[in-house]
Every structure is written in structure tokens, then in C-alpha cells.
């Protein structure tokens, strides 16, 4: 039986012999396409080649690591759905075409791998929006009998990149896994029983779809293939499903052992599959630098971790578990993906932190969901579903799954509306780039050389206007308020967390435009956003705002000082997980598996500020990327560095890097000497998510401005308090202590006054003999009602005490029992009252609270208690 490693290697060897070069897997984060969340297919890194705007390759092969989460709810419950998988692919960019692609596929599957030819079926495009693929049919007839060639329509056998762009017919190869008890007498590749599984898709990309839906021939024909390694292993290893292959069995066997289950029941089998798949996906995503969060890629990671953690809990596990499987993932992919080996402990720390946090909220969330389901309604409202997510960290997906098991649906539209109402969507500059605009940028990247950035050495430079784009991203010779590409620029484009430079454009001695932002949407071409009017072909002078750049340099260098100090105090397991650098401040997110002590953080600040005071030289050099490991440079997880890369050294020199204070790979702008940082002022430090903490601070000129403002306020306050400035804080603390005493005396007096009673209190008896005391405390705050109820209850041996207050059309109330009451409890009474107020209530038998609409006097509602 061939192992997955042997199969992977055989694919490389076969196509290398055909003259196709092996291209390494690209990152799971598609750096060249900001419209994609993850790399989901082998062709993603070759988009520019397919479009004919990058002619550096004629053909290629790869084994691409991929993540797809559109079918995440199916993972665990089908034979082949996965979130992380490896896609084997061979590609042609105007080189070979249908006959070669089909012949090679057949040769590889039947002769190299030895799959039985009589178990292979194929499909071709039967025609529709494009002619029937007769060429593919004739090519397959050389190898496959006509009865095993199926002709299908657009949905199955016509591939598109999107509404517009490259597209074409495709041919799929299916493997017959044998009878699976299907009762369909006409079972074939179109049946979904699982007998016939698609293992290879060969796309014959030959058309370019236009806006009106018409098809035009591409400049050259392309081949794009994709073959799931897991499915191929399933066929070659005679496995019943992808989870029975050697890519999963080590994980599943370990989970069986750890969770003390056999996997023989449907529930246990699904749980094991989910845990194994999500352990793989989470490990690779974290290795790319992604951390759990509430948006974007981080949200997908969080969803994967929490879904796996919940299924582990259903199997009886009540502790963080997923992180223990990371070494198994490492062993499965030994020597293939070094990012797993390099970041093993970091991956485990992130998983453990996220699982710990989730398990704490899961219990509470499930209890609240159970209460909602207990009302017997067939649909959970969007507001309730969002409340579970927002308040208890309970994902919508889990609410949906648990509700579905009870035959209850979720108002997902209402959920999205509640989410929109609670959060204002933040949109970044990158959101401007739709797929159409990305294609424009890809064409510019191919048509023009890389923008010559000279901003490390000077802030003013001469440049020529190469391209102008208007606000609709259309090229024009003259543009007012749009985007410009210059051959040379001193403007730093936003990257690495540092915001872009701003400044002006001068022509013939006059300012003609202002640069408000600079981006690198794809990576090579700098796109300058400007206001004003520019003309294509003009030679201009570009000038960066020098004062603003100085502030950016100081704040960015301060981050390097802090990062090195953190690693000195907490060890090298500290990783940067995000940063933001503006002229006004800096923000630095870092990973730490524990809550730091105050003395540890103080030591970090002291180390960073000592480095600034020591006036260390800052040297930047462009060196081979391989030097990073040799010199001990700090790199970011998942970051795609150029080779050669830019090294930023603080302290020592490149001949004596052992004397360094800090050495990082960084493309940002920096001071020449750490003395220019002046001081590092930390304004805030705290946790932002499980295992991730954030430092917010200021340095350089911005820090001086901050201190000047603090001093000005201190002087103003000193004059008001009539004390010397140096005594201001002593006096303020004394005043605060005095106010605290006065406030306590006032609260005591207020509570006694509110509890004293008067015309707003009524006492009467229910039919069962229970004494009811109703108090309207209209001047009270809702949080004061309990103390008032306690005071009243002390005056009675047996009574039901109800205290209310109304404000802005809303009513809050508490219900308390004094002594043991027959057939009466506080929570039942509170819920009855709340129901008539269109509100909610909850609590215990002796005390409950609630609220609703103040639509009529409370005494009228008390009739419901009779």
C-alpha cells in the first residue's frame, strides 16, 4: 500500500519527467489576491499566468495546501468533506492542452499508481453555453469505453473563475469504490450515494467570459487541474472514506485512546472526524500567523477550534484537548511543511488558550440556549441567537446545530440584522479592491516594472506619472481625485502595520495634488491615492511630509524595542500577532500564554527605555533571506518575505550580531539611532483575546507632545487647587478619599430614606392569605431595588415584597419573600408580572428581578396573582 508521502512524491516525479517544474505550495493567505479569504485551490497562485499577464512560466505542478470552509457543517457527516486538504495539480499556460492532459492523467493513474482501469469513469461537457467538448470525448475514447464516459452540463462540467473572466469546459475522473448498498438501479457517477467519487478535475480553460455573458477565445489555451490528495489516498489505500487514510488515522486513533471511545457509533465517528479535520486546519492556520478573533480569517479559525472542542466535550472531555494532537499533525506531515515544526509550541499555546476560554463560556451558553428552547417555539429569534453569541461567545453555528437536533430553526436573517445593529462594520482601504480591480492591478504589475521606492534614503524624489485611474478604477490620461502610479516614489506604502506616508506633488514649482494614502494591493506596484489633478506622462516632484514621517519612524522603532524587551522577559515563545503604527501612537499585539505580573511588565518598559537611552545605532541592510536563521532574526508567523529581505538591526553591527539588542526582518521606516525614540510611554496593556495581549503607547515627538499636555493639565489643576504642581496628585487623592466617604454617607442616607416608606407603599392580602407589600421607589435606580426590598422584608415575618421603579417608559422590579410562604415563590411571581409587561424576569424562589414596559400602574397587574 502506498503511503501519502509516496503518492505525493510520485506525482512530482512523474510530471517532472514530462518537463514540468515543481512550484512550492503558496501560503494559505493569498497575498496576491485581497479578495480571497484563503487559498482554496492550486490555481490561486497562478492567476496572473492564466490571465496572460505573467509569462514567466509555460507550465508547472504543485501540491497546494488549501482551506475551504463553505461546507464546514458537512465535515464529519460525509465521507469526503474536509476544511484543510492538499491539492495536487498540473498546469499549462499556453503550452500543452487536452490531448496531453488526458493522456498524462490516464498514464499516471493506471500505470504509475496502478489503479484498475475498469474502475475509472470520466465526464465531459455536453454543450450549452459553449459547444460540446468533442475533442475531450475523442481523447478519452482511447482509454475508456463509451459507456463509462458521461456527458454533463454547466453545473458539473463547465468551470468559471467568476461572473466574468477565464473559463472553459472540464473533464472529471471518478473512481468506483464498489457497492455501498445504493437502491438506485441506475446508480452511476451522478448518484450521491458515495460509490463514485471524483478524484481529479481537468479544466480546459479556453474562453474569457464577457460582461454580457458571451464567450471569447483566450489569447492561449490553459490547463488547470486539481486532484485531492486525500481522495487519491482513499482509492489507493482501499479506505472507506478519507478519514481511513494515513493522513487521518494517526489522529483518529490517538483521539480514540484519549477520549476512551471506540468510534463504533454514528455520534462517536462524526466527533472523531471533526476533531481530526479541525486539528489539521487549525494547526496550519495558526502556523500562518492567524489567531482566533471575531472577524475575517481569525473568526474562521475560532469557529474551527470551538466546533472541535464542543464535539470533544460531547465525548466526555471537559478540558482543553485539541492542542495535544498538534504533535500528531506534525508527525503526519514530517519534513513537508516546516512551519508546523518551527511553530509547534506556539500552535499548542494558541489552541489551549482558545479552548480554555471557550469551555468556560460553553457551559453558560448551553444553559441559556436550553432555556430558550424550553419555551416550545419552533424558531429561535435572531435577537436571542445574537445575544448568545455576543454575551456568551456561543457561535451561531452551534446554536443552529443544537437547535436542529430539537427540530427548531434559527432566524439567521434576524441574527444578521441584530449583528448589524450592534456593530458598525469597519471597512479598510483594501475593501475598495473588488475582483475586477484586482485584475486591473495584476495587469499593471505585469505591464510595468516594480515601483522604485527611494523613501528609505530621501523624502523628495522626481517621478513620472505612468498610470492614472479614476474613482471607478478606469484608466485615463487626466484624472482629478483618483489613483496614480509613478516610476519612482519616496512615499512609503502601508504595510507591516505602518500607515502610509502623506505629502504633496509639485509640478513646475506649484503644488498640484496631495497624496492621502499609498497602498500595494498586489505587492510590486505602489498605488497613490490623491486629490487634485494629474496628467499621464508628466514629470513631477513627490515630497513626503517630513514631520509626519519622523513621528512614524519613532513609533515603529519603539515597537522593535518593546518586542525585544518582551522576549527578554518572557522568552522567545512571544510572537508578534499584529501591530499598528501611526504618527500619533503605536499598538503592538503579542502572544503570551499567561497573564503577566505588574513587575514583569515594568521590567519590559525599563528594558525598552534603557535601549532608547543607550543611543544604539540602527542599521538596515538588504541580505539573503537565509541569513535570518543564521543571524537569529525575529520573523513574523506566516509573513511572506522577499528574498533578499530587509534586516533591521538595533545595537552592534552585522559583523558582530551577537552584540545586538534587536534584529528583525522589517520593511518599515526606522530611526537612525534609538535616541530618536526619546522615550517609550505605555498608555495601556491588557488582554484582547485568549493568549493575545495588546500594548498601546507613544514614542518620539508624539511622546513629548503627550508629556507637555500632561504638564499643562497639571499646572492648570494646581492653580485650581491652590497647591504647587508637584503636590497636585497628593491633593487629588485626598479629595477622592473625602468624596468616597461623602458618597458612602449619602448612599446610606438615601437607602434609609427610600426604605422608610410613605404614600408609595401599599399592603394587602392575596386569596391564599399571603401578605403582599408593594413599594413604588420612583427616585431609586434599578440597582437599588434589592437593598430596599431587603430592608422592607426585615419588618415582616411572612410577606411577599415587590419593589418597583419607572424610568423613560420602562419598569424595573424585584420580588422578595420574607419567611416561608405557602404556594408562592418569588421567581414565579416575577415571571407572571414580566409577561404582562412584555418583559423578562428570572431568579430564585426567595428573590427574583425583572423588567418591562411601564404601560399601566403595577397595582392593576397584581390581579394576576389572585
Image (cartoon, rainbow, N blue to C red):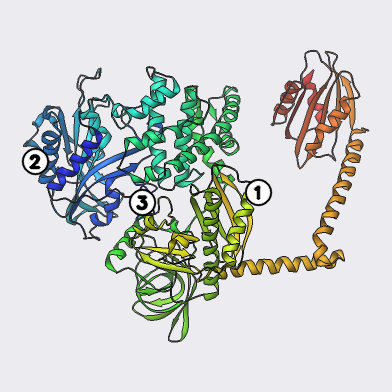
Return the residue at label 2: 139
Q: Quadrant of residue 326?
A: top left
Query: Whole-percent x and y of residue 396?
Result: 51, 35
Query: Whole-percent x and y of residue 815?
Result: 79, 26
In terms of sequence position, does the residue under pointer 1 or pointer 3 come before the other?
3
Residue 410 in view here? yes
In terms of sequence position, does the residue under pointer 3 or pointer 2 come before the other?
3
Q: For the C terminus, which image quadrant?
A: top right
Camera-nearest label, 1 or 3: 1
Q: Left or right? Give the position of 241 relative to 481.
A: left
Q: Left or right? Give the position of 641 relative to 21.
A: right
Query: Whole-percent x and y of residue 235?
Result: 21, 29
Is residue 330 depicted above or below 26 in this figure? Answer: above
Return the residue at label 1: 598
Marks 3 and 2, how far apart at CA: 35 Å
Q: Which residue is found at the position 79% from the left and 68% from the top?
A: 715
Q: State the residue in front, 724 or 839.
A: 724
Query: Quick one: label 1, few (<14), some, or many (20+) residues within 10 Å?
Result: few
Amino acid at each position: 500500500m502506498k503511503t501519502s508521502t509516496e503518492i505525493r512524491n510520485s506525482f512530482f516525479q512523474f510530471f517532472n519527467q514530462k518537463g514540468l517544474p515543481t512550484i512550492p505550495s503558496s501560503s494559505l493567505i493569498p497575498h496576491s489576491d485581497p479578495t480571497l479569504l484563503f487559498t482554496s485551490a492550486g490555481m490561486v497562485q497562478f492567476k496572473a499566468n492564466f490571465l496572460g499577464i505573467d509569462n514567466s512560466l509555460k507550465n508547472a505542478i504543485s501540491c497546494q495546501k488549501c482551506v475551504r470552509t463553505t461546507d464546514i457543517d458537512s465535515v464529519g457527516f460525509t465521507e469526503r468533506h474536509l476544511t484543510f486538504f492538499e491539492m495536487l495539480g498540473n498546469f499549462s499556460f499556453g503550452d500543452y492542452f487536452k490531448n496531453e492532459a488526458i493522456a498524462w492523467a490516464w498514464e499516471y493513474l493506471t500505470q504509475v499508481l496502478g489503479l484498475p482501469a475498469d474502475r475509472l469513469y470520466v465526464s465531459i461537457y455536453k454543450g450549452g453555453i459553449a459547444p460540446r467538448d468533442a475533442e475531450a470525448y475523442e481523447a478519452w475514447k482511447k482509454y475508456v469505453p463509451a459507456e463509462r464516459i458521461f456527458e454533463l452540463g454547466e453545473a458539473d462540467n463547465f468551470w468559471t473563475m467568476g461572473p466574468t473572466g477565464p473559463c472553459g469546459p472540464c473533464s472529471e475522473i471518478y473512481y468506483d469504490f464498489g457497492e455501498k448498498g445504493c437502491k438506485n438501479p441506475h446508480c452511476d457517477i451522478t448518484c450521491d450515494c458515495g460509490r463514485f467519487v471524483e478524484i481529479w478535475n481537468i479544466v480546459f480553460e479556453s474562453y474569457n467570459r464577457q460582461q454580457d455573458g458571451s464567450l471569447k477565445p483566450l489569447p492561449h489555451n490553459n490547463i488547470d487541474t486539481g486532484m485531492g490528495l486525500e481522495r487519491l489516498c482513499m482509492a489507493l489505500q482501499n479506505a472507506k472514506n478519507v478519514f481511513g487514510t494515513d493522513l487521518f488515522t494517526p489522529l483518529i486513533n490517538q483521539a480514540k485512546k484519549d477520549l476512551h471511545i471506540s468510534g463504533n457509533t454514528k455520534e462517536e465517528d462524526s466527533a472523531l472526524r471533526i476533531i481530526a479535520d479541525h486539528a489539521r486546519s487549525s494547526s496550519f492556520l495558526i502556523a500562518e500567523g492567524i489567531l482566533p478573533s471575531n472577524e475575517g480569517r481569525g473568526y474562521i479559525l475560532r469557529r474551527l477550534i470551538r466546533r472541535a472542542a464542543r464535539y470533544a466535550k460531547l465525548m466526555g472531555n471537559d478540558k482543553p484537548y485539541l492542542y495535544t494532537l498538534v504533535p500528531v499533525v506534525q508527525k503526519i506531515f514530517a519534513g513537508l511543511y516546516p512551519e508546523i515544526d518551527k511553530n509547534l509550541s506556539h500552535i499548542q499555546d494558541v489552541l489551549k488558550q482558545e479552548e480554555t476560554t471557550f469551555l468556560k463560556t460553553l457551559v453558560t451558553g448551553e444553559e441559556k440556549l436550553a432555556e430558550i428552547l424550553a419555551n416550545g417555539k419552533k424558531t429561535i429569534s435572531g435577537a436571542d441567537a445574537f445575544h448568545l453569541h455576543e454575551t456568551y461567545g456561543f457561535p451561531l453555528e452551534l446554536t443552529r446545530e443544537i437547535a436542529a437536533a430539537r427540530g427548531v430553526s434559527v432566524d439567521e436573517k434576524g441574527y444578521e440584522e441584530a449583528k448589524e445593529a450592534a456593530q458598525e462594520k469597519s471597512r479598510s482601504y483594501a475593501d475598495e479592491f473588488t475582483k475586477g480591480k484586482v485584475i486591473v492591478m495584476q495587469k499593471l504589475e505585469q505591464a510595468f516594472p516594480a515601483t522604485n521606492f527611494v523613501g528609505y534614503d530621501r523624502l523628495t524624489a522626481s517621478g513620472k506619472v505612468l498610470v492614472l485611474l479614476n474613482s471607478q478604477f478606469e484608466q485615463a490620461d487626466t484624472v482629478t481625485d483618483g489613483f496614480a502610479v509613478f516610476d519612482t516614489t519616496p512615499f512609503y506604502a502601508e504595510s507591516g502595520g505602518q500607515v502610509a506616508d502623506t505629502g504633496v506633488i509639485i509640478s513646475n514649482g506649484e503644488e498640484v495634488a496631495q497624496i492621502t494614502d499609498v497602498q500595494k494591493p498586489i505587492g510590486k506596484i505602489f498605488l497613490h491615492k490623491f486629490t487634485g489633478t494629474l496628467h499621464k506622462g508628466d514629470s513631477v516632484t513627490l515630497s513626503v511630509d517630513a514631520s509626519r514621517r519622523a513621528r512614524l519612524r519613532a513609533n515603529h522603532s519603539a515597537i522593535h524595542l518593546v518586542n525585544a524587551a518582551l522576549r527578554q522577559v518572557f522568552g522567545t515563545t512571544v510572537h508578534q500577532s499584529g501591530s499598528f503604527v501611526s504618527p500619533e501612537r503605536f499598538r503592538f499585539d503579542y502572544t503570551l500564554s499567561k497573564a503577566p505580573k505588574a513587575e514583569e511588565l515594568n521590567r519590559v518598559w525599563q528594558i525598552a527605555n534603557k535601549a532608547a537611552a543607550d543611543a544604539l545605532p540602527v542599521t538596515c541592510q538588504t541580505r539573503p533571506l537565509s541569513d535570518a536563521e543564521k543571524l537569529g532574526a525575529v520573523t513574523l508567523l506566516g509573513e511572506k518575505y522577499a528574498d533578499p529581505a530587509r534586516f533591521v538591526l538595533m545595537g552592534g553591527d552585522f559583523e558582530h550580531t551577537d552584540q545586538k539588542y534587536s534584529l528583525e526582518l522589517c520593511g518599515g521606516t526606522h530611526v537612525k539611532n534609538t535616541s530618536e525614540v526619546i522615550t517609550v510611554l505605555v498608555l495601556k496593556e491588557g488582554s484582547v483575546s485568549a493568549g493575545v495581549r495588546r500594548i498601546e503607547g507613544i514614542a518620539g515627538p508624539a511622546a513629548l507632545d503627550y508629556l507637555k499636555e500632561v504638564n499643562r493639565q497639571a499646572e492648570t489643576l494646581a492653580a485650581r487647587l491652590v497647591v504647587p504642581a508637584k503636590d497636585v496628585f497628593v491633593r487629588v487623592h485626598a479629595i477622592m478619599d473625602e468624596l468616597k466617604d461623602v458618597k458612602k454617607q449619602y448612599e446610606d442616607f438615601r437607602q434609609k430614606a427610600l426604605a422608610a416608606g410613605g404614600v408609595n407603599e401599599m399592603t394587602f392580602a392575596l386569596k391564599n392569605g399571603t401578605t403582599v407589600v408593594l413599594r413604588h421607589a420612583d427616585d431609586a435606580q434599578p440597582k437599588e431595588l434589592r437593598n430596599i426590598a431587603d430592608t422592607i422584608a426585615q419588618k415582616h415575618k411572612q410577606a411577599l415584597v415587590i419593589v418597583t421603579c419607572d424610568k423613560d417608559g420602562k419598569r424595573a422590579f424585584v420580588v422578595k419573600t420574607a419567611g416561608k410562604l405557602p404556594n408562592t415563590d418569588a421567581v414565579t411571581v416575577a415571571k407572571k408580572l414580566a409577561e404582562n409587561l412584555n418583559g423578562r424576569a428570572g431568579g430564585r424562589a426567595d428573590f427574583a428581578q425583572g423588567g418591562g414596559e411601564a404601560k399601566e400602574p403595577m397595582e392593576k397587574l397584581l390581579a394576576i396573582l389572585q
